[in-house]
Amino acid sequence: MATALRLFNSNGVDRVAIYKIASDLGISPGNLTYHFAKKQDIIYSLIDRLEIEAAEVLTTPRNPGAKHLAGYMVNLFSLMWRYHFFFESLTYFTATDPHLAESYRRIMHTAIGGSVQRIENAIACGDIEPMKAPNSPKILGENMWAVWVNRLGAARSSLDETSDGVAAIYDCCVHHISLIQPYASNSYVARLHEAVKDLLDVDQDSVARQATG
């Protein structure tokens, strides 16, 4: 699975034939198709793994503290980066494959629900101001998910295939923080930003240089 994941991420699903996966594994195509009759079966297996890993990240304790939220963001965006081929092809996958569409909906709903709970907890703690209609924690959570998915592809497009993804993960985190910032105290935003940089072991200037080449 690791070989297929690497090839899909590097080249896109459409450009990876099943014989290419077999070749990189050092086995015959027949040997591979004995276990996976077609490429779609490999994709299903990978997305099943993504769901399991996503559930572990998304159901972590919903502590509103800056360090905990930073850890949640970094873990979530790192996971999305590891499977970025899927998120970059969502329109195609969800329009053509009911199985993948349902997997995506489950991940999305769990992620949005987790975001809403974390936002509400932060409001209760006074780190984020209560929202005024028509905005709400649910709308902000939905906006966060939309930004995450879109920024992942945008950030990756500026990186080469040898990148470890830190710049893309940091970019997603910063855009997440920007959505919270209008409602959060300056100290909370600063703590959150610093915690993200500490977890990724980067400084803002070095990440900016990596992203721009």
Image (tube, rainbow, N blue to C red):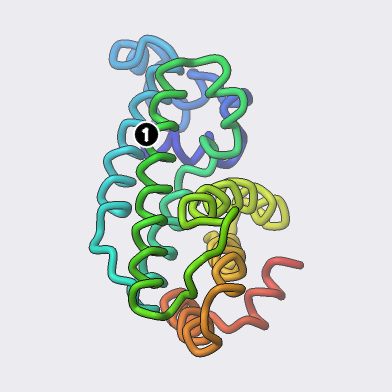
- Expressed as whole percent of the image width and height from the top left, the position of residue 202 reads 53, 80
Q: Is residue 200 left or right of residue 58?
A: right
Q: Nearer the viewer, residue 212 or 59?
A: 59
Q: Residue at the spot x=64%, y=80% of the render?
A: 206
Residue type at mark 1: give it.
Answer: Arg
Above or below — where is 122 with respect to 11? Answer: below
Residue 15 is drawn in which quadrant? top right
Q: Quadrant of the N terminus?
A: top left
Report crowding for label 1: few under 14, some 14 to 19, many 20 or more residues within 10 A (C-alpha).
some
Closer to the camera in the image, 179 or 206: 179
Q: Residue furthest bottom?
A: 187
Residue 204 point in image, percent of width and height: 62, 81
Residue bearing the label numbered 1: 106
The answer, for residue 213, to whether it is visible in the render is no
At a point 61% along the width and 73% down the height, the residue shown is 182
Q: Is residue 166 above or below residue 16?
A: below
Residue situated in front as seen by the camera: 147 or 136: 136
Q: Position of residue 199 (x, y in %)?
A: 41, 76
**Residue 3 seen in this snapshot:** yes
Picture residue at 41% right of the left edge, 56% below the top: 115
Q: Secondary structure at mark 1?
A: helix
Q: Is residue 36 left or right of residue 169?
A: left
The quadrant in which the C terminus is found is bottom right
